[in-house]
Image (tube, grey):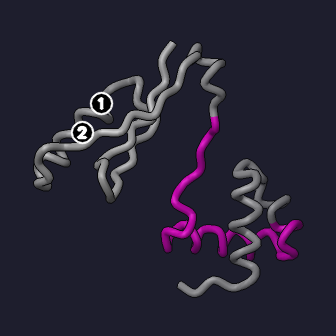
């Protein structure tokens, strides 16, 4: 899918506020609401818009300490990487997991009370 100026406008507006109503989004990009809805759904189908999320303040959940932990695996087989990834992502303290290239294999973002 090739994006045009309107598509980029829709993406930009939703990045700034994913809770915009379709009517408000249409007004901001200068289209009719029906056309905006069709284009937004197309962006979703094509995987340009992969989802919508709520950003939560960790302090509101009692998370007072966050840390980044780098990990280097001894083995780098697909199975070992998969097992490690699944194990780490099952931990409730893990906020994000990054699989990296370079000296370290993973960067784990954790938050604890």
Which residues make up the magenta segment?
A: 26-55
Question: What residue lies at 33% left-to-right and 59% top-to-bottom?
Answer: 101
Does the magenta run of residues contain 36? yes
Image x and y of residue 86, in percent: 24, 39
Q: Quadrant of residue 51?
A: bottom right
Mark 1 neighbour class, 10 Å CA radius: few under 14, some 14 to 19, many 20 or more: few
Measured as percent of width and height from the top left, residue 33 is found at: 80, 68
Tell me residue 104's x, y (percent).
31, 48
Q: Residues within 10 Å of mark 2 (few under 14, many from 20)?
A: few
Q: Please state the total of marks drawn on the protein image.
A: 2
Q: Are marks 1 and 2 in contact (CB under 8 Å)?
A: yes
Q: Residue at x 48, y 28 (%)?
A: 67
Would you place residue 32 above or below residue 106 in this image?
below
Whether residue 92 sits left or right of residue 3 in the image: it is left
Which label was assigned to residue 49? none
Q: Secondary structure at mark 2?
A: helix
Q: Is residue 83 on the magenta stretch?
A: no
Q: Nearer the viewer, residue 98 or 101?
A: 101
- Residue 86's disc number: 2
Q: Residue at x 63, y 83 (%)?
A: 3
Nearest to the observer: residue 30 or residue 61: 61
Residue at x 73%, y 69% (from the top left corner): 10
Image side of residue 90 versus residue 69, left or right: left
Residue 71 appears in which quarter of the rendering? top left
The local secondary structure at tag 1 comes to loop
29 on left or right of 111: right
Distance of mark 1 from mark 2, alpha carbons?
6 Å
Task: Please identify the residue farthest to the front as the structure is shown.
Answer: 103
Label of residue 90 in the image: 1
């Amino acid at each position: 899918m090739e994006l045009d100026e309107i598509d980029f406008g829709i993406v930009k507006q939703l990045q700034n506020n994913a809770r915009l109503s379709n009517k408000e989004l249409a007004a901001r990009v200068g289209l009719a609401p029906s056309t905006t809805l069709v284009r937004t759904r197309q962006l979703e189908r094509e995987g340009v818009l992969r989802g919508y999320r709520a950003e939560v303040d960790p302090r509101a959940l009692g998370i007072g300490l966050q840390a980044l932990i780098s990990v280097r695996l001894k083995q780098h087989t697909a199975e070992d990487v998969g097992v490690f990834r699944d194990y780490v992502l099952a931990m409730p303290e893990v906020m994000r997991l990054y699989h990296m290239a370079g000296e370290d294999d993973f960067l784990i973002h954790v938050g604890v009370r």
